Image (cartoon, rainbow, N blue to C red):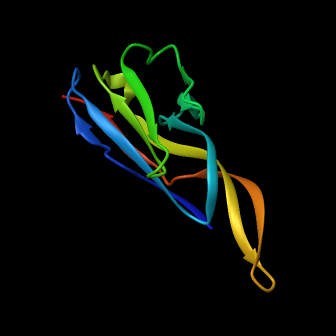
Amino acid sequence: QVQLVESGGGLVQPGGSLRLSCAASGSIFSINTMAWYRQAPGKQRELVASITSGGSTNYADSVKGRFTISRDGAKKMVYLQMNSLKPEDTAVYYCNANVIRRTVVGGGATELSAVDAWGQGTLVTVSS
């Protein structure tokens, strides 16, 4: 199994900052692209930011210049630094990762397979 666990969400005032963290664990051989999504009540889930294994980043237009995604390959973690937060940033933020999973089969042999993993989400509320 592969697990993603988010942390760092909470209540913050407009203009404030939060840093979200996501830790990947389990039978992981390697991690390809990691990303943050968010979903506000009544809205569709949207991609906030992504980062490839090579470090290339991509951001939604609404967060460019305010959010920064980064990763630590050795620790299997991805972060989202959120600055200048606005009320419209309020949402549940989900960690996503495309993972190459390593499993043990039979008499100790291993198999590799790809899986798209999701965390359970962490709530970010931007309000006075």
The residue located at (38%, 45%) in the rendering is 21
Q: In the picture shown, does residue 46 fall above or below 108?
A: above
Q: In the picture shown, does residue 63 fall above or below 92?
A: above
The residue located at (20%, 28%) in the rendering is 13
The residue located at (43%, 18%) in the rendering is 63
How many marks can you see?
0
> Left of 4 or right of it: where is 21?
left
Q: In which quarter of the image is the C terminus?
A: top left
Q: In the picture shown, does residue 47 fall above or below 102?
A: above
| Residue 12, horizontal then vertical, whole percent | 22, 34
**Residue farthest bottom in this picture:** 107
> Left of 89 or right of it: where is 107?
right
**Residue farthest right in this picture:** 106
Camera-nearest residue between 60 and 53 = 53
Q: In which quarter of the image is the N terminus?
A: bottom right
The residue located at (33%, 28%) in the rendering is 82
Camera-nearest residue between 63 and 87 = 63
Q: In the picture shown, does residue 15 fall above or below 41?
A: above
> Left of 80 or right of it: where is 59?
right
Residue 19, quarter of picture: top left
| Residue 110, horizontal then vertical, whole percent | 76, 71
| Residue 52, horizontal then vertical, whole percent | 60, 33
| Residue 6, horizontal then vertical, whole percent | 42, 51
Residue 9, quarter of picture: top left
